[in-house]
Amino acid sequence: MDILLTGSVAYDYLMTFPGLFKEQILPERLEQISLSFLVDSMSRQRGGVAPNIAYTMALLGQRPRVLATVGEDFAEYRAWLDKAGVDTSLMEVVPGLFTASFFATTDRSNAQIASFYPGAMGVASQQSLTGVRPRPDLVIVSPNAPDAMMKFPAECRQLEIPYLYDPSQQVLRLEGAELARDMEGAQFLFANDYEFGLISKKTGWELEQMLRHVQVLVVTRGKDGADLYTNGEQVFIPTVPERQIVDPTGVGDAFRGGFLSGYAHGFDWKLCGEIGSLAAVYCLEQKGPQSHAYTRAEFVARFREHFDDGGKLNELLRD
């Protein structure tokens, strides 16, 4: 199956402050606030929803394509994705701009102050699905510049290409009418439980109403697993016990990558979700959204410690 991912591509600059932000803030002086924090560590991680999902798919033997706009600083990132098995030929460098960047400082209580620079992502709507060849079997519409997130679902409907709608963090920016319009006709809707609540509030749609507009709805619930709803059926997807918890960044993207890898093989919904569940845990056990790695044989062996695949995952080993 040819899966094309659209969405953000970014560098994540993650810093840690050994103190507490709240001890540095003077409530009576907020109008004149001026703070600079001396951090004791910083790491730059490759991130962005589209390549995060694609990376896990590539680990599991797929070769997804990513359609995105990136900056002049993308060469090293492109080489990394190419080596991992992601098709980057549709990732377009925009002259004079940097790749989108996320700057986050976390204190010792896990409070966080962050900034996001959209950079080249800001012109993502200049790209189009109409000229993409070959025509993809499924398009993933994940968080992106707002105008691009409206354009790509519209093009999917126009071109009659099935799409997965994953508004994620952009739910905050999108109005209810916009969410409803782009859910209409989507093959999948993915959201975490908080985002699901926001979508419901903004659209006025409860679960049953959403399922009149999307074919498959997946709601992830962190340590409580995930639920999949389709055709009057509900499938519960449990979590896999972690060996350690290091960093939750990108865990949802890894789940999607695992799920889509199972879907590309035509596996049933339960098995797709279980593959996603294990893929998510591998990400949780490392720092950053693309630091986890495994062979497919290692993945299958660990999978069978927790789930019964009936031998179906042998297909992963044969790819």
Image: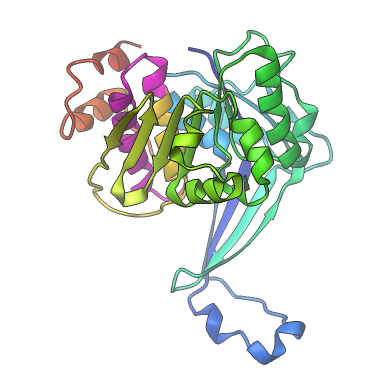
- Above or below, 149 relative to 12: above
Count of picture labels: 0
The answer to if 279 sits in the magenta stretch is yes
> Does residue 45 show up?
no
Task: Return the residue nearer the eye: 223 or 56.
Answer: 223
- Most common SS among magenta residues: helix
Q: Residue at x 55, y 33 (%)?
A: 51
Q: Residue at x 73, y 27 (%)?
A: 92
| Quarter residue 125 falls in | top right
- Above or below, 129 relative to 35: above
Task: Return the residue nearer the eye: 7 or 285.
Answer: 7
The answer to if 133 sits in the magenta stretch is no
Q: Does residue 159 appear left or right of residue 57 in this picture?
A: right
Q: Does residue 303 appear left or right of residue 272 in this picture?
A: left
Q: Residue at x 23, y 48 (%)?
A: 243
Q: Does residue 190 appear left or right of residue 169 in this picture?
A: left
- Above or below, 283 relative to 84: below
Task: Return the residue nearer the eye: 226 or 133.
Answer: 226
Colouring? rainbow
Please identify the quadrant where the C terminus is shown. Answer: top left
Give the image location of residue 153, x and y in percent.
66, 27
Give the image location of residue 65, x and y in percent.
58, 21
Give the image location of residue 209, x and y in percent.
49, 35
> Does residue 37 show up?
yes
Q: Does residue 257 appear left or right of residue 12 in this picture?
A: left
Give the image location of residue 113, x and y in percent.
59, 67
* Magenta residue span: 261-287
Question: Which residue ends up furthest to the bottom in the rendered image?
Answer: 28
| Quarter residue 128 falls in | top right
